């Protein structure tokens, strides 16, 4: 398996006076799970979209194995999987049809095999012929993940994948992520601090569009108290005036 | 093609098929009844002028409704189901994506004009009509459909709300249609306002001669509008 390297250099974006992302610099390599933490409005989703190649910032670059997300977009997208916060659901389609549509969209060759593989990983066998609009939230999230990993991405971006899931599903997701991170660089955002600590090899903390801290969770001699660090760095929305 | 699973599309299809069939039969009835009056006339209308052109004109008017729904939903609907994720994940060129969506929209719309087109083709086989004017008329209808679809999809790419997009498409297409009827003072020569209307150009196809400038109007407009949609899609990636 080829190594993976993500380089983010001076990423910046503003909307009028509002800073969305401010001078983000980040270098990640190897297969690992990285969690981005931060209060609402910290810029997590914007950073996720920028890394997924779904959003272009006003300045800065995102390189995956040296391939620019803006200049070589098509090539970049072939290496990336993106699981958005709210799942893509085309209500008229069944689960299998939506997976086929996404496979065509990602231009995956031999997509029958890929679909079979993701259906197995995400345990979607029983709902394959069900209309997507009739799925429960848990299955919608599994479909969301299945679509993201269809192209066997080197970099998997997951924007708040645990939102609204019950404890059983959180455990299933944790297992899936643990399995995927053996051959993928996973970057996810979440508000669940305990899960972040459980799943991740590294934790990034964001506030006001800036990356404030970059903590390795397994190499240090003592267990980091993520909650304490998080509270030190961030202020709740509405109280940072 | 998942549009075809929406009940509203089938309702509109049923209505349009009914209107097409009814108009067609009504025109044949009228034309047959008037044969006696035509007997003494030197410039009596031909079957093409009496039946085919009115049927195609009725189809063109019906298309305003159909295209407004199909094209209006095309991009605006992506906001409701997070469909922009699909667009942004597309590992091909944006233009390719736009063209695929455009072709799909055209294909669904063609289903609506198919009953009338089949009736016309059947009639032309069963009678001895001159084929060329019929071919021009059908070509005109197809070009009009392509033009309306391109404009509708461009409008849809500008709007975030599906309902508003459909309404806006309908209003714009109707206004452009109606301006061809403007009776502006023509003292200074041509009425230029009319020239902007697709209806004016479509009428050029309901003659036995093919107008090159009209062909250019439709083809150039379609290309410009497709490029404009492509630009909109690219531009969206700079917005959150």
Image: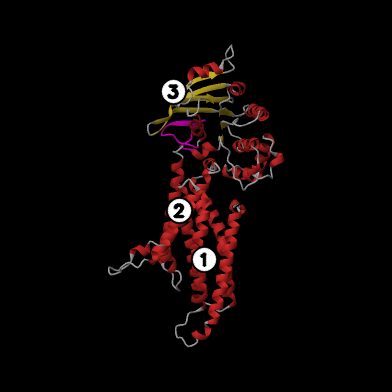
Q: Is residue A173 above or below residue B79?
A: above
Whether residue B173 sits left or right of residue A119 in the image: it is: left
Residue at (49% x, 68% y) in the render: B57
- Between circles 1 and 3, the one closer to the viewer is 3
1 or 2: tag closer to the N-terminus? 1
Q: Residues within 10 Å of mark 3 (few under 14, many from 20)?
A: few
The chain under label 3 reads A
State the extent of the magenta-drawn residues as a range.
A54-72
**Mark 2, residue position:** B168
User: Regarding mark 3 in the picture, which secondary structure is present there?
Assistant: loop
Residue at (66% x, 30% y) in the render: A169
Q: Are marks 2 and 3 on the same chain?
A: no
Q: Is residue A35 above or below residue A94?
A: above
Residue B54 visible within the image? yes
Q: Are marks 1 and 2 on the same chain?
A: yes
Quadrant of the image occupied by residue B91: top right
**Mark 1, residue position:** B59
* Mark 1 → mark 3, Cα distance in angstroms: 61 Å
Residue B216 visible within the image? no
Residue A231: image x %, image y %?
A: 51, 18
User: Regarding mark 1 in the picture, which secondary structure is present there?
Assistant: helix
Q: Is residue B132 above or below residue A72?
A: below
Q: Are marks 1 and 3 on the same chain?
A: no
Q: Is residue A114 above or below residue A21?
A: below
Residue at (63% x, 38% y) in the render: A140
Q: Which mark is residue B201?
A: none
The chain under label 2 reads B
* Mark 1 → mark 2, Cα distance in angstroms: 21 Å
**Mark 3, residue position:** A240
Residue B185: image x %, image y %?
A: 30, 68
* Mark 2 → mark 3, Cα distance in angstroms: 42 Å
């Amino acid at each position: 398996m080829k190594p993976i390297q993500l380089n983010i250099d001076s990423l910046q974006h503003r909307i009028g006076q509002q800073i969305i992302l401010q001078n983000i610099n980040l270098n990640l390599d190897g297969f690992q799970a990285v969690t981005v933490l931060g209060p609402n409005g910290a810029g997590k989703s914007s950073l996720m979209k920028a890394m997924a190649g779904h959003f272009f910032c006003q300045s800065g670059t995102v390189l995956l194995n040296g391939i620019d997300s803006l200049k070589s977009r098509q090539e970049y997208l072939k290496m990336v999987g993106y699981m958005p916060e709210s799942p893509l659901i085309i209500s008229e389609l069944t689960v299998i049809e939506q997976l086929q549509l996404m496979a065509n969209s990602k231009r995956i060759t031999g997509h029958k095999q890929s679909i079979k593989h993701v259906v197995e990983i995400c345990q979607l066998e029983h709902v394959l012929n069900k209309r997507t609009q009739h799925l429960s939230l848990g299955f919608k999230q599994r479909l969301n993940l299945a679509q993201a990993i269809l192209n066997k991405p080197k970099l998997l971006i997951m924007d708040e994948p645990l939102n609204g899931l019950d404890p059983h599903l959180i455990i299933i997701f944790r297992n899936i992520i643990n399995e995927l991170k053996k051959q993928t660089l996973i970057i996810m955002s979440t508000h669940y601090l305990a899960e972040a600590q459980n799943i991740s090899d590294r934790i990034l903390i964001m506030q006001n569009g800036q990356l404030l801290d970059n903590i390795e969770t397994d190499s240090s001699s003592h267990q980091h108290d993520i909650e304490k660090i998080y509270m030190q760095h961030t202020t709740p929305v509405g109280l940072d005036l | 093609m998942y549009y075809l699973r929406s009940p509203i599309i089938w309702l509109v299809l049923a209505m349009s098929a009914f209107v097409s069939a009814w108009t067609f039969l009504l025109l044949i009835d009228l034309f047959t009844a008037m044969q006696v009056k035509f007997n003494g006339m030197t410039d009596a209308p031909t079957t093409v002028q009496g039946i085919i052109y009115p049927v195609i004109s009725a189809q063109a008017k019906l298309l305003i409704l159909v295209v407004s729904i199909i094209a209006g939903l095309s991009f605006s609907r992506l906001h409701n189901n997070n469909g922009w994720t699909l667009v942004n994940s597309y590992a091909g060129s944006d233009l390719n994506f736009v063209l695929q969506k455009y072709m799909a929209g055209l294909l669904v719309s063609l289903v609506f004009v198919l009953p009338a087109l089949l009736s016309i083709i059947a009639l032309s086989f069963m009678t001895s009509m001159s084929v060329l004017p019929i071919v021009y008329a059908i070509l005109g209808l197809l070009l009009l459909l392509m033009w309306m679809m391109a404009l509708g999809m461009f409008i849809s790419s500008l709007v975030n709300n599906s309902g508003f997009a459909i309404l806006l498409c309908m209003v714009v297409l109707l206004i452009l249609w109606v301006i061809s009827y403007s009776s502006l003072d023509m003292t200074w020569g041509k009425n230029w306002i009319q020239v902007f209307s697709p209806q004016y150009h479509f009428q050029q196809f309901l003659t036995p001669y093919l107008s090159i400038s009209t062909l250019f109007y439709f083809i150039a407009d379609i290309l410009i509008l497709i490029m404009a949609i492509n630009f909109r899609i690219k531009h969206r990636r700079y917005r959150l």
